[in-house]
Image: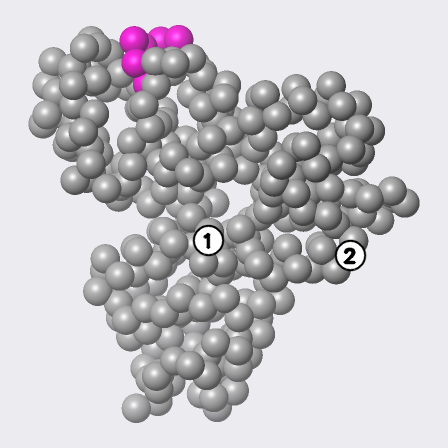
């Protein structure tokens, strides 16, 4: 069976990651003193290794940052209290928070004012959600992506007449749709107001994946991106949900560990995956296919 390789149009860095990467790189190039990265700028090991090789110092503890230092925040946002600590230290803060994440924070605050309670659909341990919660009042609950766990917050939801819903920007759309259906069945007397905070870039990548699988009858999907990237995981899960044979890799070197690939192969990437890595994977696949 022959092999044909298709590369998604939406691949490589999204605009938000590109912006964060450029701001971090500019800070490294403009300053003689050390530049600290407060956690992983983006969820991609190769990008982080590149920045470290350029001289970036990655820290997770604010106590490790000296007074007056140059600090680059992560694209997922920064906790309100952490930002205040850095300002008190006299740090020069290079804020790379993605504009989409900042907008989601604004919408969450507005939804909280308009409703008695607020649900954040996402991963409590994800830095975006951690940062978001620091800007909200206590009347909020974080609900995981797992439908089996949604019942655990039923008692909390039943006390309210109106509840707002916002989502981690990198969630798959189908998770949000499933949650809405569950909520309406379970709490018919509680009004649910939804602010769609899903990142359009993430949704466009997911939509392209679905449409291509449907139109081209794709045999294999290869997802390229960091194993700790939420939006990359969303692509992987979406391809799995549609019954595709799917593999998740970080670099072209990992292709050698995959079984023999045949038929039409779709190559997609997470939003924090550099185009150079996508291109390298694509070229190796096309070489093997004789294209």
In the image, residue 152 sits, relative to residue 64, either above or below, namely above
Which numbered disc, 1 or 2, marks the residue that appears first in the sequence? 2
Left or right of 103? Residue 65 is right
Disc 2 marks which residue?
54
Helix, strand or loop at disc 1?
A: loop
Could you tell me which residue is drawn at 64 percent across and 55 percent down?
A: 48
Mark 1 — residue?
228
Tell me the residue at 56%/33% (across/down): 77
C-alpha gap between disc 1 and disc 2: 22 Å
Q: Secondary structure at mark 2?
A: loop
Q: Is residue 133 magenta?
A: no
Residue 225 in the image, given as x and y percentages of width and height: 49, 60
Q: Nearer the viewer, residue 94 or 102?
A: 94
Q: Which quadrant is the N terminus positioned in?
A: bottom left
Residue 27, by quadrant, is top right
Assess disc 2: are there few (<14), some (14-19) or many (≥20) residues with their C-alpha within 10 Å of its C-alpha.
few
254 or 2: nearer the viewer: 254
254 lies left or right of 179: right
Q: Residue at x 39, y 8 (%)?
A: 113
- Is residue 211 visible from the viewing direction of this image? no
- Residue 149's tag is none
Q: What residue span does the magenta drawing correspond to?
A: 113-118
Residue 74 locus on image (x, y percent): 61, 39
Task: Examine the rendering and report whether any part of residue 77 can be seen.
Answer: yes
91 up-or-down from 147: above or below: above
């Amino acid at each position: 069976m022959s092999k044909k390789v298709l590369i998604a149009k939406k691949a490589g860095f999204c605009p938000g990651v590109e912006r964060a990467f450029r701001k971090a790189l500019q800070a490294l190039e403009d300053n003689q003193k050390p530049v600290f990265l407060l956690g992983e700028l983006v969820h991609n090991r190769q990008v982080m290794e590149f920045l470290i090789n350029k001289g970036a110092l990655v820290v997770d503890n604010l106590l490790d940052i000296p007074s007056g230092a140059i600090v680059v925040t992560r694209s997922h946002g920064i906790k309100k209290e952490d930002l205040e600590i850095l300002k008190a230290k006299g740090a020069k803060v290079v804020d790379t928070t993605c504009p989409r994440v900042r907008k989601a924070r604004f919408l969450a605050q507005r939804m909280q004012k308009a409703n008695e309670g607020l649900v954040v659909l996402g991963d409590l341990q994800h830095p975006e959600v951690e940062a978001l919660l620091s800007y909200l009042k206590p009347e909020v609950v974080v609900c995981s992506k797992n439908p089996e766990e949604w019942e655990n917050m039923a008692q909390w939801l039943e006390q309210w007449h109106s509840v707002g819903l916002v989502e981690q920007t990198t969630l798959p759309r189908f998770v949000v749709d499933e949650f809405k259906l569950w909520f309406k069945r379970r709490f018919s007397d509680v009004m649910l107001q939804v602010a769609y905070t899903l990142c359009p870039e993430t949704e466009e990548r997911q939509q392209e994946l679905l449409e291509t699988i449907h139109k081209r009858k794709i045999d294999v999907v290869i997802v390229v991106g960091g194993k700790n990237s939420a939006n990359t995981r969303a692509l992987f899960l979406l391809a799995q949900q549609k019954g595709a044979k799917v593999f998740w890799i970080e670099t072209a070197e990992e292709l050698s560990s995959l079984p023999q690939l045949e038929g039409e192969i779709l190559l997609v990437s997470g939003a924090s995956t550099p185009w150079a890595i996508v291109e390298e994977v694509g070229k190796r696949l096309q070489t093997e296919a004789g294209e």
